[in-house]
Amino acid sequence: MFSYRFRDLCKTPPFAQFRRQTQILSLEILNVFLHLKFSPSLNLNKIEHFSKVSFIVLPFVIIVLSYSVNAWSQVSAPEVQAVTAWGESAVTNNPALDKQLAITHARRTALEQVVGSYVTSSTLVRNFQVVEDRIYSKATGFINSYKILQENRGETQRTQIEALVSLAPVAEILRASGLLRKWRVGILMAPEQLDSTLRFYSKSRIIEIAGGIESEIGKKMIEAGFKTVDPRHLEKLRKEFNTVPSTSFKGIDLLITGTISLDARSSAGPMRQATCQIHCKALRVDTGEIVYQDIVGNTFDGVNLLVSRDIAFKYAGTLGNGMLSDGTPDLRAFGISDSAALQKAIHLSSVMASDIMVSQITRIPAAASSRIALEIHGLEFSQLMELEDYLKTVEGVANVSIEEFADGIQNMEIEYDGDAIILARSLSQSDACKNMGLKVKNITKNKIILKSN
């Protein structure tokens, strides 16, 4: 199984990275879109219920593709991360104690590196006591093992270790504390094997099932503290697939896609048995990186699990099945009819996929930053270009995006390590804004309005 790891993208030229990542993202999205839009056995444009399905079709699909995507393989966020760190302690007459104190310091430093990959420095400063009490003070509990790489004893005792840090509990504490990045998630599901699936359901019912799985995943995302894309925005993207401007795709951080495979057959007794398998993918829109890819669902034999045993144990009881003779959690779905068995299988797969996606997204390393909208009145276009160049130099600004310029009003989106109040204060005190006569007129949580004299 392949694992999602921290990658040094600097080893590849930036344009080559962008081209490759764009091609991967394009093919993944286009694959799902073609399932929905062009299948001869399911002409979805003519189904009134189709409006219930959320679509995210990024503008990248218009790019000419010259590479193929690798065959399906499992991709997931890592469970542990190997971190190298130094620790120090004062030198006393007790070398053994000095060494142990240096190791303790090194373990904390390793944990700080991991936390720093999830949370920005300004967020850590503002919430230091929370992180100290819940994570740093319990560093030993988050480190599975460590080995000493080198040590030297001089004016201080210095020890370098390689520690294996367990990511899931660290990320979960940060999420529960509200410190993780509030990912904005779009969800797109499509039925697979349409001809065989139509044996069980009507076309409109199949679309409702896909929409129901989207809703279940979206509900879990919101409960976990993440954000989901407004369905009205997704509907607009679907309707304007061929003409929608690229700026309409702002506000999507992660895209969850998936195809749904359904099947049913007779069991050993009078009952019917069904399976629902969701081929899930999670992609970062900004990089095109596939951060999760796997199949979630159940099987007919019940022995071959498509999910971890922990997830299987959690949900086997909801089916009333218990365990198989070999101790495997029984995820088989039975019913008096195909429809009844499929209903159980679909619900089972959707809740398992929801849990897994939340867990995976929680472990994606991304320092939390704010996206702040700037609405600027009264500047000439040349001045706006100067302002854009200045904003890129402001400490804490990670990215500046130009939204639109119309009727003397410029809209920008700033990715900023801080909140709108801090950014507004910085702008109001800057020479650049003063020279342009810009003054802050209004501030909300996610928006700043600037007007020229």
Image (cartoon, rainbow, N blue to C red):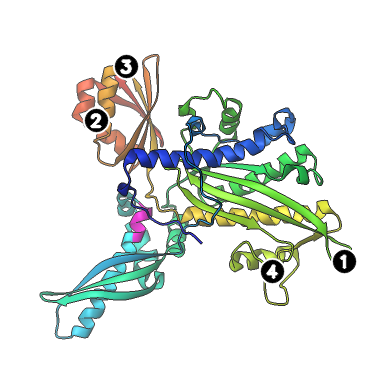
In the drawing, does residue 118 fall left or right of residue 156?
Answer: right
Q: Secondary structure at mark 4?
A: loop
14 or 313, which lies in front?
14
State how far apart marks 3 and 2 are (Cα): 17 Å
State how far apart marks 1 and 2 are (Cα): 73 Å
Of the numbered discs 3 and 2, the one sitting upstream in the chain is 3
Q: Secondary structure at mark 2?
A: helix
Of the numbered discs 1 and 4, the one sitting upstream in the chain is 1
Residue that appears at 65% across and 42% down: 190
According to the picture, the residue beneath numbered tag 2 turns out to be 390
According to the picture, the residue beneath numbered tag 1 turns out to be 269
Picture quarter with the C terminus? top left
Of the numbered discs 4 and 2, the one sitting upstream in the chain is 4
User: Where in the figure is residue 376, as x and y percent of width and height?
Assistant: 34, 23
According to the picture, the residue beneath numbered tag 3 turns out to be 378
Q: Secondary structure at mark 1?
A: loop
252 or 262, which lies in front?
262
